[in-house]
Image (tube, rainbow, N blue to C red):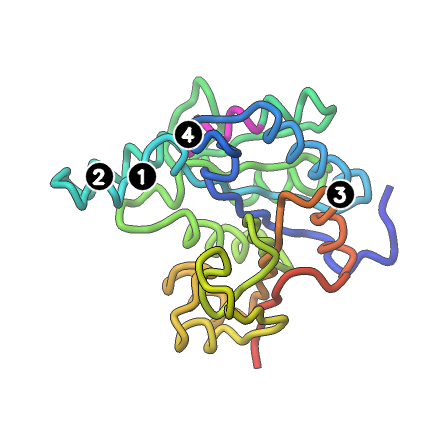
Amino acid sequence: MAQSNLKYKRVLLKLSGEALAGNQGFGIDPDVIVGIANQVREVSELGVEVALVIGGGNIFRGLAASSKGMDRASADYMGMLATLMNSLAMQDALEKAGVDTRVQSAIEMHEIAESYIRRRAMRHLEKGRVVIFGAGTGNPYFTTDTAASLRAMEIGAEVILKATKVDGVYSSDPAIDKDAVKYDTLTHLDVLKLGLQVMDATATSLCMDNNLPIIVFDLTQDGNIKKAVMGESIGTIVEGD
């Protein structure tokens, strides 16, 4: 049932792999993934078209492995496979919550996911299905942040919802620095100049060039995805000048 007071009708939700691990720090916490699925169902039922990109850091971090001597391309491909594992877990949780979901992979794996086809993805969204984009961009040397920015623009998303464990963007890590200052609004250029940990520089530059806003918010607070799509002031919004 679509609501006229929605601020955003088509969104891309970016989840880190670590978000799925919860407090255990590794793997997939079933309670966490069910909670996320319920939040996604809530906004889907409002008529919001939702796409997801999920990282793989809870299973394998390509960059960390390459820093210890593994070939970077091989390590990144392993990271892409980790994102597919998370995507399939999220699909299962969403479908158990009653949400039609499709996984599209940037690397062909016909037995477990559709291949990424932009027009097919958009058609799924128009039909009210949630689409999960797995395997990043399909290319090594690019992060899932960059994949999120790229897919968001390809499907015409109005905003990237960057889900984190903190309630916005701070001048430094609030868990370490008690004097850290929270920003309510930033420009993409501010993020790049100040080196803030929102998304990596490639992803942020893509968003800046295409005037795509990013909302950074706390996923652990139930109902925050709904608040974001309704335009309520939560977290930090990064947008053009």
Q: Earlier in the sequence, mark 3 or mark 1?
A: 3
User: In the image, which residues are magenta?
Assistant: 83-90
> How far apart in space, not on screen, are marks 4 and 1 (Cα)?
11 Å
> How far apart in space, not on screen, are marks 2 and 4 (Cα)?
16 Å
Magenta includes 172?
no
Q: Nearer the viewer, mark 4 or mark 3?
A: 4
Helix, strand or loop status at disc 2: helix
Of residues 109 and 28, the one drawn nearer to the viewer in this rendering: 28
Q: Residue furthest top?
A: 111
- The amino acid type of the residue labelled 3 equals Val
- Are the residues tagged 4 and 1 within 8 Å (C-beta)? no
- The amino acid type of the residue labelled 4 equals Phe
Q: Earlier in the sequence, mark 2 or mark 4?
A: 4
Look at 55% across and 48% down and name the residue there: 165
Give x and y (percent) for residue 129: 68, 34
Q: How many marks?
A: 4
Residue 212 placement: quadrant: bottom right
Disc 1 crowd rating (10 Å Cα; few below 14, some 14-19, many 20+) is some
Q: What secondary structure is the magenta-colored segment mainly?
A: helix
Residue at the spot of label 1: 61
Residue at the spot of label 2: 65
